[in-house]
Amino acid sequence: MSYGANIQPGIPEADDAPIASLASRISGLSTSNTPHPPSSSDSQPQSPPVRPKPNTSNNLFGKALAGVKSDRASAPSPSTSTATSTPAPAPVAATAAAPAEESKKNVELLPAKEEGKDKMTNLMDEQDGWGEPAQNGNGEKKEVVDTSMSEASGLISNEFQVEVKLADLQADPNSPLYSVQTFEQLNLHEDLMKGIYAVGFKKPSKIQEVALPLLLSNPPRNLIGQSQSGTGKTAAFSLNMLSRVDPAMMTPQAICLAPSRELARQIQEVIDKIGQFTDIKTFLAVPGSWSRNVRIDKHILIGTPGTLVDMLSRGGRIFDPKQIRVFVLDEADEMIALQGLGDQTTRIKRMLPPNVQNVLFSATFNDQVRSFAETFAPEANQLFLKLENVTVDAIKQLYMECNGEEGKFDALSALYDCMSIGQSIVFCKRKKTADDIAERLTSEGHSVASLHGDKQSRERDDILDGFRNGKTKVLITTNVVARGIDIQQVNMVVNYDVPDQGPEGNFEPDIETYIHRIGRTGRFGRKGCSVIFVHDGRSKSDVDYIMNTLGKPMKRIDAMNPADLEQLEKALKIAMKGPN
Ligand SMILES: Nc1ncnc2c1ncn2[C@@H]1O[C@H](COP(=O)(O)OP(=O)(O)OP(=O)(O)O)[C@@H](O)[C@H]1O
């Protein structure tokens, strides 16, 4: 018995291409079909650690791929009829009539209409408290404004009176939250529907509407899905796992990996909530959560790669990997590309059955990661965004010029009053900077918390819980919570340091990390502001590069100008209200 309709475990597809070295992983040169069982050599990486090269072009998130692509012409997939008979949702750019042999959906998630904005979107622009951008990214730079924000931005007067409804946003074809279908039409088990109603979801988002039928169709098929931050990817892959496990079998049947314990815990909560009316149980697989002598009898494991490697290296004593049907990678680009995580994720995958359904989700997939993703999840249905749609428009991106490195702290101090409107996250490059800032702000009488990887697990949990339930208003952190963390009240993100790719990437700006960091605000229809600090020529050119690459304007604000801070305050108040 399972919570899916007629779901059969197993996919008749070759998922056993060895992924012998990182170099071949990235270049996709691995072509042998020899099965690759786990071996002791797995623990010894054969080649030096490699991370896909930094992105230096605008082609960061793949080319615009429309229509249905096939590279399986000779062997029609058993899933062909299911895939092509899936109702084609209106917002998907191209679900063009596919030749009979084409079985893999390769879809670009586009707004239904690109030309102009409809009434609703214009209304939203006017209500964000900022008016039109002073500077256009995308290479068409206008002169940066020296005038005060309030003069330049055209703040409208009635911003607090207008109620924005989520239902209106979800009715806007330009929104990533738009769908033409209801959850009822997605053919989910009634106990899962009860869970969806219990968490208050009324209508699917675009990624949920498009991905769920692909994920749930039989025989199961791999999926690579990209959708903007805060658009509901977690529920999409959670519903798939919940639909595919058999609650009568008291053993893990689905694994979901995330890059941090914080995100793994959050995903477990989502699955538990949506699955609360089922008999499905979850287990959090993070350091310290399991015992070497105790077998796990829960259905879904959510964890971090190191722990799963440890569990699996105990020769099936913790759980039987052969029973795993679904392998989900949240933040998949990081899970497969980053040197440490990529190695571990690959080792785990090798220990799972070859017919496991691989599901990869992220808000970002640069070209190199994308080709490796295609090797990792062969013959996958693919949902990708165009570069210009990767960031959420509701996040107002700002930059602030500071007087040298020390001026950054002064700017943060000046911002502090605004930062306590709602909640904010300040991202730093180094753990020490996070601790130093937290200490200085605390000594100035402010209530802040710092969170990073040097803290003990329990302390990390407590700090994030304190922030999640609103006890702390400002979280100063590193990239440890840059991805996935969903706290709706966060209405501002501060990039204290420009995210960079470290020595391997010649310290180039890390666009993906920037996108994920700012994506901690503006979640599912809410508005948010992000501020990035510029303190020297290098950081200014990095910010220009980010603007130009993403083609999104950033407005300059001056921390020492009361008019700008007032403007920011107003925008944050608007963002706090959120849709209802
Ligand atoms: N259909 C829906 N209706 C209303 N709210 C939803 C719906 N789906 C998801 N949400 C809410 O949207 C928020 C963001 O969802 P989620 O964390 O899954 O985003 P995400 O796409 O995984 O983002 P990220 O890329 O940052 O990981 C959550 O608070 C979730 O409860």
Image (cartoon, rainbow, N blue to C red):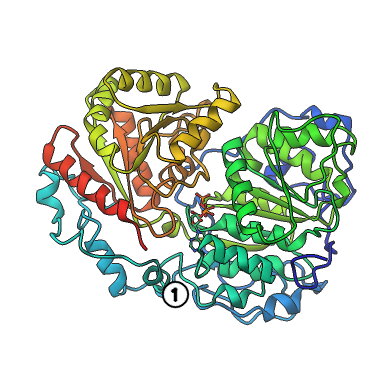
Secondary element under disc 1, as helix, strand or loop, is loop
Crowd around label 1: few <14 · some 14–19 · many ≥20 (10 Å)? some
Q: Is residue 477 visible?
A: yes
Q: Is residue 105 visible?
A: no
Front position in the image: 173 or 239: 239
- Residue 124: x and y in percent read 28, 64
Q: Residue at x 39, y 72 (%)?
A: 172
Front position in the image: 150 or 275: 275
Q: Residue at x 59, y 27 (%)?
A: 458
Q: Is residue 340 left or right of residue 482?
A: right
Indicate the quadrant where residue 27 lies.
top right
Front position in the image: 136 or 478: 478
Q: Is residue 97 left or right of residue 459?
A: right
Quarter of the image where the C terminus is located: bottom left
Please name the residue that numbered disc 1 is placed on: 112
**Up-down relation of residue 428 to residue 202 (above or below):** above
Quarter of the image where the N terminus is located: bottom right
- Residue 13: x and y in percent read 83, 62
Q: How many marks?
A: 1
- Residue 439: x and y in percent read 36, 18
Front position in the image: 411 or 499: 411
Indicate the quadrant where residue 405 lies.
top left
**Up-down relation of residue 283 to residue 69 (above or below):** above
Q: Residue at x 77, y 68 (%)?
A: 72
Residue type pointed to by label 1? Ala
Q: Is residue 494 left or right of residue 236?
A: left
Indicate the quadrant where residue 442 lies.
top left
- Residue 541: x and y in percent read 32, 36
